[in-house]
């Protein structure tokens, strides 16, 4: 389920923290001993103790968002450096933001020293580790000679992937027909070295070290069974795995896994890795807490305006479907005339899309919707853990009942206050785009993408596009 070692990830985080702390120390030493820029006493350039704590945390957060701690073995050095550059850019922006808020006396030149030194240290030891790992792999492992059982498209794609690798550690030997005896081969089928009856002799004669089975073992009945099982357990927080088969289950973004020592294929498991889930939750709590503190006076003004404008509750509780299909009550400032609990009747056109000139919207409600201020109480949902700052928009239960099975993939991540759909048209876009946008976000998730969506949300809210 986890494609990397938690020990390796923890070791890398600790090493990065030490590297950033070292960069802070060296930056102070450079600023003190090399008299460039405005002169001053040495004490003025000493790094504040709190920065030795905040600095590493900022870098870890930014590097995590740039996928630096996703330690896949097949990443090239170029890919690793690219991820590091993206993370360093994010860390730079966060670092300058923290300096502006709490450490305005910190030397600007010294901040550039920190950024440059931290990047050089992080880059240098990553190159050393990468080269050492390559040397160990080449010294420890002989060239693997791979034999593929199967002759279909899946087998051909696997053979092409092996043959196209730049590394000399994998050598493709050939195909073996899965039939025991001669059979009629399909058109454009690659030639085989023999059949299963010849497998032992082929392995011996060609010095095979690895055999890969690439067959479509699942028929349509089995695929339908998997879909049915996924539907049955979609409302429960469970993972689903099947015994090894690398064919049609790829549609479910299946991944290999070891479960109690048994190799299985995971076809339903958490989209977010443990570290991503923790980082997302920590950032949600920090962002929501800060927003609630800043918006408290605004909450009071909005509450007074709603009460004076029309009778009814100030805040509404609306049932929504959240992470892994769990229901919860989402909070919103009331923006409509209160009637029968302000619930929508089944079959109402308001269930499908919002109307620009909805007669039920109050005068204050129209302003709240136009500025998206009616969504502010959802910061409490974020603190409770019902929602996230960024994610697919929570859906009403009766709409979820009409979902196709593939649309329910959107519930595999926490539902959010804003998301990819909201910054790409909001209510101006047809409803059928919503799920496709949500699935795009899920497939491309990263903390860096969350950060981009938050920034673009601010712009969309200011412009008021699709808000009614």
Image (spheres, rainbow, N blue to C red):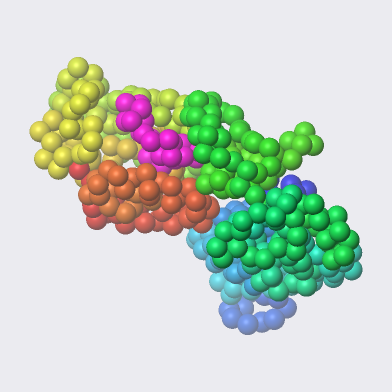
Residue 29 shows in this picture: no
Q: Is residue 278 left or right of residue 361?
A: right
Q: 32 or 204, which is in the foreground?
A: 204
Please determine whether, in this image, residue 179 is positioned above or below residue 381. below
Please determine whether, in this image, residue 264 is positioned above or below residue 94. above
Seen at 69% across and 42% down, the residue is: 244
| Residue 398 forms part of the magenta stretch | yes
Magenta residues, as a range?
392-415
Q: 173 or 190, which is in the foreground?
A: 190
| Residue 129 forms part of the magenta stretch | no
The N terminus lies in which quarter of the figure?
A: top right
Seen at 50% across and 54% down, the residue is: 444
Seen at 25% across and 49% down, the residue is: 429
Q: From the top left corner, tell me how far across and down residue 281 is, in percent.
A: 55, 40
Residue 338 shows in this picture: yes
Q: In which image quadrant can residue 397 be found?
A: top left
Q: In which image quadrant can residue 164 be found?
A: bottom right
Q: Is residue 134 left or right of residue 139?
A: left
Q: From the top left corner, tell me how far across and down residue 305 is, in percent.
A: 20, 32
Q: Is residue 392 left or right of residue 91?
A: left
Q: From the top left corner, tell me how far across and down residue 186 is, in percent.
A: 57, 59
């Amino acid at each position: 389920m986890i494609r990397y070692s938690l020990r390796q990830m923890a070791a890398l985080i600790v090493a990065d923290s030490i590297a950033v702390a070292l960069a802070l120390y060296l930056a102070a030493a450079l600023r003190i001993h090399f008299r460039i820029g405005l002169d001053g006493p040495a004490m003025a350039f000493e790094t504040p103790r709190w920065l030795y704590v905040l600095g590493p945390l900022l870098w870890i957060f930014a590097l995590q968002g740039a996928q630096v701690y996703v330690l896949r073995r097949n990443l090239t050095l170029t890919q690793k450096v690219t991820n590091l550059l993206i993370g360093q850019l994010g860390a730079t922006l966060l670092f300058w933001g923290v300096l502006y808020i709490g450490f305005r006396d910190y030397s600007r030149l010294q901040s550039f020293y920190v950024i440059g030194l931290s990047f050089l240290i992080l880059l240098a030891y990553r190159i050393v580790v990468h080269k050492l790992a390559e040397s160990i792999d080449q010294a420890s492992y002989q060239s693997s000679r791979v034999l593929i059982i199967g002759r279909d498209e899946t087998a051909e794609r696997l053979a092409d992937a092996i043959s196209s690798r730049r590394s000399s550690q994998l050598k493709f030997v050939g195909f073996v027909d899965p039939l025991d005896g001669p059979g009629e081969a399909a058109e454009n089928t690659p030639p085989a070295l023999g059949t299963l009856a010849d497998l032992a002799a082929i392995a011996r004669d060609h010095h095979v070290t690895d055999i890969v089975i690439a067959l479509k073992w699942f028929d349509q009945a089995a695929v339908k069974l998997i879909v049915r099982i996924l539907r049955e357990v979609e409302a429960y927080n469970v993972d689903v795995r099947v015994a090894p088969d690398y064919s049609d289950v790829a549609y479910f973004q299946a991944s290999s896994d070891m479960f109690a020592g048994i190799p299985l294929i995971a076809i339903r498991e958490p989209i977010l890795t443990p570290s991503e889930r923790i980082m997302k939750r920590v950032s949600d709590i920090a962002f929501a807490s800060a927003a609630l503190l800043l918006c408290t006076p605004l909450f009071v003004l909005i509450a007074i305006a709603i009460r004076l404008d029309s009778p009814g509750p100030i805040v509404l509780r609306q049932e929504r479907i959240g992470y892994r299909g769990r229901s919860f009550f989402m909070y919103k400032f009331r923006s409509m005339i209160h009637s029968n609990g302000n619930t929508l009747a089944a079959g109402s056109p308001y269930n499908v899309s919002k109307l620009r000139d909805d007669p039920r919207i109050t005068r204050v409600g129209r302003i709240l919707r136009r500025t998206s201020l009616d969504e502010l109480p959802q910061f409490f949902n974020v603190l409770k853990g019902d929602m996230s700052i960024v994610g697919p928009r929570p859906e009403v239960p009766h709409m979820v009942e009409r979902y196709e099975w593939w649309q329910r993939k959107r519930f595999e991540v926490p539902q959010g206050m804003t998301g990819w759909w909201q910054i790409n048209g909001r209510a101006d876009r047809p409803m059928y785009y919503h799920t496709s946008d949500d699935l795009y976000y899920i497939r491309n998730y990263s903390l860096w993408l969350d950060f981009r969506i938050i920034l673009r949300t601010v712009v969309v809210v200011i412009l008021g596009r699709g808000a009614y």
